[in-house]
């Protein structure tokens, strides 16, 4: 297999990880949150994943990033993993997951607005802009037509939940762009993700302390399903999908990589259909087709190359 074909194969595997594997972590979160409070869950998840990656880096003798890169990675890790992922969980105290998923799915459009460096590239390619808009419409329809009123928000705190969820999307985008802009050229390694995870873990434990999540916490009282959920999040959420995301944004434009926010909710609901006998209506299948059409349009004429 030629180097170009091998690279393209790796890109496909990475997209599978962030599209499909990341989507399955919604179900894992449900199990894990039955035994862990939100920021404690994030802290343990990121700390253990970071420790495992650190061992890998030491065994493989991967070079430690420069001090300036460590600072950049720490800031981007906190913005993405706590400000982004963490705030979504917090927002779901006030709005349900379906509504939150639609708000988070604004990330590709936010990249179009905030990624000034690549705005000319995006604006000159109508397929990208139209595709991202079509994909967003598709995911909105998908959630809207899902059973059990999953698109309905929880009053009276819906505005609060909406603002928090949108803020989480903005912080994820800012964290991604900040890291991509300020890291030394070609400096991304597994050690980069390791530092992001450790920084996010420490910040999550700090928030857990300030909000009283440690009070009454006991590892002995954690149920087996909660442990299973945590382990799944570590292996497939952080070590597989998050690593894939971090690598993909070094070889693809962030707006295109962020289309995983269109697919993840679909995968999550399909998992519920397969494992929990949750209903799926015909209009949802139409919406899935719209989502896939949007993604296909956004990827047309998109060249896979480093530092896009």
Image (cartoon, rainbow, N blue to C red):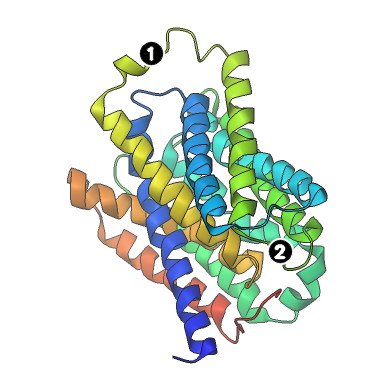
Q: Earlier in the sequence, mark 2 or mark 1?
A: 2
- Residue at left offset 77%, top offset 51%: 69
Which quarter of the image is occupied by the N terminus?
Answer: bottom left
- In the picture as drawn, the residue positioned furthest to the top comes out as 216
Disc number placed over residue 294 in the picture, else none: none
Q: Is residue 94 at all visible to an observer of this figure?
A: no
- Residue at left offset 29%, top offset 45%: 147
Looking at the image, residue 1 sits to the left or right of residue 161; the answer is: left
Residue 137 spot, x, y in % from top left:
51, 61
Which residue corresponds to mark 1? 218
Looking at the image, residue 149 sits to the left or right of residue 126; the answer is: left
Q: Quick one: 36 or 102, which is closer to the camera? A: 36
Q: Which image quarter: residue 201?
A: top right
Task: Check the image and report above or below for 162 versus 207.
Answer: below
Q: Neighbour class for label 2 at 10 Å: few (<14), some, many (≥20)?
A: many
- Residue at left offset 80%, top offset 75%: 120
Task: Check the image and report above or below for 158 versus 178.
Answer: above
Disc number placed over residue 112 in the picture, else none: 2
Looking at the image, residue 94 sits to the left or right of residue 273; the answer is: right
Which quarter of the image is occupied by the C terminus?
Answer: bottom right
Task: Check the image and report above or below for 163 versus 286.
Answer: above
Residue 306 spot, x, y in % from top left:
67, 77
Looking at the image, residue 283 sits to the left or right of residue 258; the answer is: left
Q: Which image quarter: residue 207?
A: top right
């Amino acid at each position: 297999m030629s180097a170009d074909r091998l690279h393209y194969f790796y890109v496909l595997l990475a997209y599978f990880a962030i599209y499909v594997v990341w989507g399955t972590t919604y179900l894992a979160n449900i199990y894990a949150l039955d035994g862990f409070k939100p920021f404690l869950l994030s802290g343990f998840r990121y700390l253990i994943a970071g420790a495992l990656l650190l061992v890998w880096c030491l065994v493989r003798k991967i070079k430690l990033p420069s001090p300036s890169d460590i600072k950049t990675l720490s800031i981007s890790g906190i913005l993405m993993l706590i400000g982004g992922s963490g705030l979504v969980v917090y927002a779901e105290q006030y709005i349900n997951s379906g509504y939150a998923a639609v708000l988070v799915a604004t990330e590709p459009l936010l990249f179009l607005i905030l990624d000034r460096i690549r705005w000319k590239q995006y604006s000159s390619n109508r397929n990208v802009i139209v595709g991202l808009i079509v994909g967003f419409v598709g995911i909105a329809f998908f959630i809207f037509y899902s059973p059990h009123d999953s698109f309905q928000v929880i009053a009276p705190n819906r505005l609060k939940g909406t603002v928090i969820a949108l803020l989480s999307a903005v912080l994820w985008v800012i964290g991604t762009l900040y890291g991509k802009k300020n890291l030394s050229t070609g400096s991304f390694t597994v050690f980069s993700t390791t530092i992001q995870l450790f920084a996010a873990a420490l910040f999550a434990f700090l928030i857990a302390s300030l909000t009283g999540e440690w009070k009454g916490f006991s590892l002995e009282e954690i149920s087996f399903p909660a442990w299973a959920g945590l382990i799944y999040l570590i292996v497939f959420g952080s070590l597989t999908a998050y690593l894939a995301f971090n690598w993909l944004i070094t070889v693809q434009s962030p707006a295109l990589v962020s289309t995983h926010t269109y697919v993840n909710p679909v995968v999550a609901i399909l998992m519920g259909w397969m494992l929990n006998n949750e209903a799926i209506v015909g209009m949802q299948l139409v919406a899935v087709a719209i989502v896939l059409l949007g993604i296909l349009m956004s990827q047309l004429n998109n060249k896979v190359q480093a530092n896009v």
